[in-house]
Amino acid sequence: MIKSYIKIALVCLFITSCTKYQKLQKSTDWQPKYEAAMKYYEKKDFARAIALFEDILPIIRGTKEAESANFYYAYAHYYQDLFILSSHYFETFLEVYSRSDLALEANYMYGYSLYMQSPEFSLDQTPSYEAINVMQNFINQYPTSEFAKNAGSIVNELELKLEKKEFENAKLYYKLQKYEAAIVTLENFIKEFPGSAFQEEALFLTIQTAHDYAQASILSVQNERFKSCIDKYQTFVDKYPSSEFLKDAEKYYVNSTDFLSNFASRNN
């Protein structure tokens, strides 16, 4: 019996709530809508908050309420996981209210919304590049902000993702036996990401790729390409004399020197 009363009470409450919301939507008075939108936001009813904000934003331009309405409108989209929209609205807020006390947080949330759009490393990384740019500018502008440390962590995380993408692209070229493209991509990676955790393996892979490229080549160019493999080996050993890849690197080096020795013998 008690459970039935509770259910009836909840249904009545829901109906009352819906009726109140519907009346607000039909109202032409923006002030109650603004106050209700803020209350819905505080109650985490972001869908209703967004709907009411959308009704009043074109009307309240230039008022003191417009600033907070635009700010929480952007946040409401963020909390709905609508990150493309939230990044757009935080950016728009910054353009309109650049001197606002809320600008610092909006700037960070603009970058954070872009960060939340960053896909897995194998996909297009345009949002990652954009997020890095926004977050780095944020750090430069607000180095002592409470958000600066987290912004730095995000930049590091996204840069690692970009490194991994480039590195995996090079490895994919190797797997597809596109050796020349693999070598170019690996060498570009080594130049572009000198502090990368993948540097050692990337340098080793230049040896492996150069060796396999030489083996797959016609006889007239093999001599030159095996020499290139040896040069890459020497560079690798100088930089990483105790590398975990050293034994495998030595195999490619020995194969290359053996080929050159045999080549020299045949031409004497």
Image: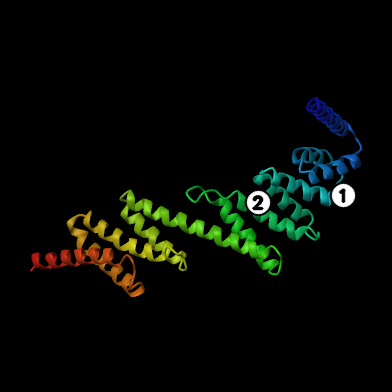
The percent coordinates of residue 235 (x first, y second) are 32, 71
Q: Quadrant of the N terminus?
A: top right
Residue farthest toward the front in the current orientation of the protein: 1
Q: Which one is in front, 174 or 8?
A: 8
The residue that mark 1 highlights is 65
Q: Residues within 10 Å of mark 2 (few under 14, many from 20)?
A: many
Q: Amino acid at mark 1?
A: Glu
- Name the image quarter holding residue 3: top right
Q: Quadrant of the C terminus?
A: bottom left
Q: Residue at x 79, y 41 (%)?
A: 49
Q: Which one is in front, 230 or 51?
A: 51
Of labels 1 and 2, earlier in sequence is 1
Q: Residue at x 55, y 57 (%)?
A: 158
Q: Residues within 10 Å of mark 1 (few under 14, many from 20)?
A: some
Q: Residue at x 21, y 59 (%)?
A: 221
The percent coordinates of residue 215 (x first, y second) are 22, 56
- Name the image quarter holding residue 81: top right
Q: Which one is in front, 189 or 249?
A: 249
The residue that mark 2 highlights is 113
Would residue 166 be seen by someone viewing this image from the given angle?
Answer: yes
Q: Amino acid at mark 2?
A: Ser
- In the picture provided, is 97 more to the left or to the right than 171? right
The percent coordinates of residue 212 (x first, y second) are 26, 57
The percent coordinates of residue 4 (x first, y second) are 79, 25
Q: Secondary structure at mark 1?
A: helix
Q: Residue at x 82, y 51 (%)?
A: 68
- Name the image quarter holding residue 40: top right
- In the picture provided, is 136 more to the left or to the right than 254? right
**Label 1 to label 2: alpha-carbon separation:** 24 Å
- In the picture provided, is 1 more to the left or to the right than 151? right
